[in-house]
Image: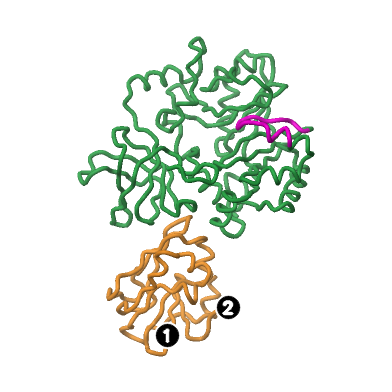
Chain colours: A orange, B green
Amino acid sequence: MNGISGNYKFLASHEWAKLEEDGSVTVGISDYAQEQLGDIVFVELPELNSEFNQEDEAAVIESVKAASEVYSPMGGKVVEVNTILEESPEIINSSPYQEGWFFKLKPVDIAEFDNLLSPEEYSELC
Amino acid sequence: MVDFNGWEMPIHYGSQLKEHEFVRESCGIFDVSHMTIVDIEGKDAKGFLRFLLANDIGLLNQDFDGMYSALLNESGGVIDDLIAYKLPSGYRLVVNCATRESDIEWIDSHKGSMEVTVSERDDLSMIAIQGPHTFDTLSNCFSSNVYSDLSKKRPFQGLQEGETLITTTGYTGEIGVELMIDGERAKAVWKQALLSGAKPIGLGARDTLRLEAGMNLYGSEMDENISPLECNMAWTVSLEDESRDFIGKESFKRKKEEGDFHVLKGLLFKDRSIVRSNQVIYFDESKEVKGVVTSGSYSPTLKKSIALARIPPSHTETCMTEVRGKINKASIGEPKFVREGKIIF
């Protein structure tokens, strides 16, 4: 898959998790998801310090077409939010795997990362 | 690509937002061949249409002039909205594709003993060219005579070039034209327009453009149970000639006199969360008085969430709705947001 390396893993519902060197996990949506949604015009991001279980609803994105939920690929506490997206949600379309990240989590159970889909497994779903 | 009432049509050709902006700033070309074209001819065509349409076709003086009108049912509900043109041979109606069959049935069923022929022109394609650079594009697609004649026309006029009808109409709030044209010729014009810098525009941008322009979409702003009074179409119902009878006239007049109906307004929301059709609008915490969103989307020109909504006329300042449990407040204004590239809300 283009634009990503081995430390990205996926939920079947099109979110990615990237394991960072400091042990935190960055979350975003896949290139396929942004393409299906079309131009993204609004995001509702989680509050800092909010906590999720794996696959909890964590954010909402609206394209011109429709609103969609974003599920957290892993359980944990939100330690950073990409607030730039609130003013410039189109970054998700132009850079879904880098600048278009949604939030960073401090994971509860790192083993959850291993249970996610590999880029190859995920790409078979698209 | 999506199935749009049996027509395979693109939502966008890459980016809906970029297409929208391109029409506001430059020139877009739309394949709108899904629209249904019906020619009404014969000795009684004028009398027939004066009875069938809520607007008075008798007001069209020159050939190729057009007018916006509704087809009403007996109870004054909108069966469809359309544009009617006067042609040398009779009249032409351009109606919606979703209502094609029911419209043609309705028209046929009212012919009675009148001498009229109703023919669907499915041999014609339809192209819209819209945006401030429309006439630059046209100068590359048509002869200089056609170009110069067209540039003198007011909105809702037209001319014929060979078999092609060109009218100064559209669905974007920009200057522009619509062409009713033979399929082969349509392909040539399309190619020529692209070469001269126009870009193709999909259904997605067509919808946000018309929403910003405050133009109605059949099935959203109006249907068979909605009066022209409730969808900002009262101005298309002509009562000037009192002797003219038309379908829905009595119901329309009665409702107008009673005065107890909601009206179509434009809403500009404070928060960016998108407010979509059928969402309930209210005016205070009690939520006793309600309205409804008929069309809502993100406005690429205002960069805000906008909507058309049917609300009680007593409320003219502010209103609110709930999106995922959060209140989004809006200011109320006339149901139009953008005209010729400028924000007018």
The residue at 64%/19% (across/down) is B61
Pointer 2: what residue? A2
Is the residue B273 above or below the residue B279 in the image? below
The residue at 33%/69% (across/down) is A46
Q: Position of residue B291 (x, y in %)?
A: 32, 40
Is the residue A32 above or below the residue B11 in the image? below
For badge 1, the amino acid type reads Leu
Q: Which segment did they paint magenta?
A: B148-161
Q: Position of residue B197 (x, y in %)?
A: 70, 53
Indicate whether residue B154 is drawn in magenta. Answer: yes
The residue at 70%/34% (across/down) is B150
Check the picture and name the quadrant holding the N terminus of chain B: bottom right
Q: Callout 1: few (<14), some (14-19), or many (20+) C-alpha neighbours within 10 Å?
A: some
Q: Position of residue A122 (x, y in %)?
A: 51, 76
Pointer 1: what residue? A19
Q: Position of residue B117 (x, y in %)?
A: 68, 21
